[in-house]
Image (cartoon, rainbow, N blue to C red):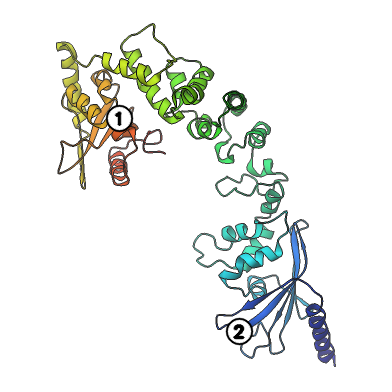
């Protein structure tokens, strides 16, 4: 009698669900037959309450010969979750959850949209893509996804509630944190910079002198924002990419204004204003191109011993070209002896790499020719090479050593730049050859202009 009574209760529940007017979605099998129907009783910003009524099946035990009705309550905010099958609570297991979601990949977005509210739109599909399969798991599954989201990854809901929907590349320092700032392990100043200036969270880090670095960065960001308002152009993205993500690592790449300011004892803010804004508005030069052009200009004028020269020329390219023409590439006997003494060390880097070969310039004239053919200023590096400050190498095709392709500079066991014609980055195959070369000689490439974006 008890089983009969329960069966009647189950049937009444099915009928009540079917006539309730709840939003629903049908699960269709690969053979186009109906597997069952999901009904959404309630959905909240932090969870949902659903039923799934299986169609009767003689072969599928999870469906049952009479068509099992399953009920699932999922409450992220209160960390509450359970599943009932035919009115009896069962274990919240991967298998039991998956039995309520027998949907194909084509249905996935529709299902998650059905379960979502306006405030948590995107939470489930994004979390499923991250948590449905981890490490060596090949197939994404609803069961493991919902369990992981509820337990070790429950902070996802808090981040979505705060409007942070793109955090795939950000380090989670404290998954049990009570706020996004605590979850990402950010200082109050860093969180302020994220909110006010939309700085990528991956930029920030912790470590020595963190308060000093935070204060310096927020001061620079405030300055850049004031320049954006003054000049009417946006440069924050360029500034972030070329400058601020290196501040927390205690170094700057040589293609950054901060590096040039620190190297040549210039005002950081004045140089930022000039390279990011004045060169763009007055001369039509992008920030990256201006930094590269200015780097050669300030190096040449400094090496030539100029004491009085325009540090912020109105026409940067013209000033650069004039400095390049004046740069002394004709060596006297002593200087030529110095050049030749460096040649053996430079030629130690020569290497064949598949279809490519890396060679060292034999004479100062080789540098001049390289710069003329490729349209850049390597000819002005004669002094640096002679003094041992730089090692300049040429990437050529192995079967055509006379045809310049890419010019490489090495300083302090690091490749600092690698550029082809008109200072364009190397092509894919050329870049791969250069990276193999760097690995062979244990050279760092983290600051290499042309190889890193």
Question: In which quadrant of the rendered view does residue 397 lie?
Answer: top left
How many numbered marks appear?
2
**Location of residue 230 in the rendering, given as x and y in whole percent from the top left corner:** 60, 23
Q: Are marks 1 and 2 in contact (CB under 8 Å)?
A: no
Residue depicted at 16% across the width and 21% down the height: 340
Left or right of residue 44, residue 63 in this image: left
Determine whether the residue tagged by mark 2 lies in a helix, strand or loop. loop
Residue depicted at 27% across the width and 25% down the height: 378
Q: Is residue 240 above or below residue 220?
A: below
Counting other residues with Cα less than 10 Å from the Cα at mark 2, is it few (<14), some (14-19), or many (20 or more)?
few
The CA distance from mark 1 to mark 2 is 66 Å
- Residue underneath mark 2: 33
**Location of residue 163 in the rendering, given as x and y in whole percent from the top left corner:** 68, 47
Left or right of residue 448, residue 185 in this image: right
Counting other residues with Cα less than 10 Å from the Cα at mark 1, is it few (<14), some (14-19), or many (20 or more)?
many
Front residue of 358 and 133: 358
Q: Is residue 107 above or below residue 293?
A: below
Indicate the quadrant containing the C terminus: top left, top right, bottom left or bottom right: top left
**Location of residue 198 in the rendering, given as x and y in whole percent from the top left corner:** 62, 37
User: Residue 343: in sight, yes or no?
Assistant: yes
Q: Residue farthest to the top?
A: 308
Residue depicted at 34% across the width and 36% down the height: 424
**Location of residue 314 in the rendering, given as x and y in whole percent from the top left corner:** 43, 16
Q: Is residue 266 above or below residue 2?
A: above
Which mark, by number, is residue 409? 1
User: Residue 254: in sight, yes or no?
Assistant: no
Question: In which quadrant of the rendered view does residue 390 lie?
Answer: top left
Indicate the quadrant containing the N terminus: top left, top right, bottom left or bottom right: bottom right
Determine whether the residue tagged by mark 1 lies in a helix, strand or loop. strand
Front residue of 334 and 107: 107
């Amino acid at each position: 009698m008890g089983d009969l009574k329960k069966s009647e209760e189950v049937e009444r529940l099915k009928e009540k669900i079917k006539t309730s007017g709840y939003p629903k979605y049908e699960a269709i099998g690969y053979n186009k037959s109906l597997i069952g129907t999901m009904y959404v009783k309630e959905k909240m910003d932090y969870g949902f309450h659903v039923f799934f009524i299986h169609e009767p099946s003689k072969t599928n035990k999870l469906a049952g010969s009479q068509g099992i009705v399953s009920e699932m309550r999922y409450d992220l905010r209160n960390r509450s979750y359970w599943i009932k099958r035919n009115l009896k609570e069962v274990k919240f297991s991967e298998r039991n959850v998956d039995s309520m979601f027998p949907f194909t990949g084509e249905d996935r977005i529709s299902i998650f949209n059905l379960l979502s509210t306006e405030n948590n739109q995107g939470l489930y599909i994004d979390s499923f893509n991250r948590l449905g399969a981890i490490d060596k798991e090949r197939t994404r599954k609803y069961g493991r996804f919902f369990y992981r989201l509820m337990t070790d990854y429950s902070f996802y809901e808090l981040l979505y509630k705060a409007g942070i929907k793109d955090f795939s590349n950000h380090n989670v320092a404290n998954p049990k944190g009570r706020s996004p700032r605590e979850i990402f392990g950010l200082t109050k100043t860093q969180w302020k910079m994220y909110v006010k200036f939309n700085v990528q969270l991956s930029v920030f880090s912790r470590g020595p002198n963190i308060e000093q670095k935070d204060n310096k960065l927020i001061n620079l960001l405030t300055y850049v924002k004031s320049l954006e308002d003054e000049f009417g152009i946006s440069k924050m993205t360029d500034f972030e990419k070329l400058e601020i993500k290196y501040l927390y690592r205690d170094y700057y790449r040589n293609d950054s204004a901060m590096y040039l300011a620190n190297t040549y004892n210039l005002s950081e803010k004045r140089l930022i204003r000039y390279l990011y804004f004045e060169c763009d508005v007055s001369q039509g030069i992008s920030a990256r191109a201006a930094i590269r052009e200015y780097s050669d200009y300030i190096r040449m004028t400094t090496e030539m011993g100029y004491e009085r020269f325009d540090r912020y020329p109105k026409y940067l390219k013209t000033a650069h070209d004039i400095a390049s023409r004046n740069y002394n590439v004709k060596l006297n006997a002593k200087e030529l002896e110095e050049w030749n003494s460096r040649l053996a060390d430079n030629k130690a880097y020569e290497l064949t790499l598949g279809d490519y070969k890396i060679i060292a310039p034999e004479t100062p004239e080789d540098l001049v020719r390289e710069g003329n053919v490729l349209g850049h200023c390597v000819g002005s590096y004669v002094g640096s090479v002679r003094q041992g400050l730089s090692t300049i190498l040429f990437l050529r095709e192995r079967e055509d050593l006379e045809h310049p392709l890419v010019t490489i500079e090495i300083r302090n066991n690091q490749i600092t730049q690698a550029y082809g014609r008109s200072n364009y980055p190397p092509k894919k195959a050329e870049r791969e050859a250069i990276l193999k070369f760097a690995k062979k000689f244990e050279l760092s490439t983290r600051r290499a202009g042309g190889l890193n974006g």
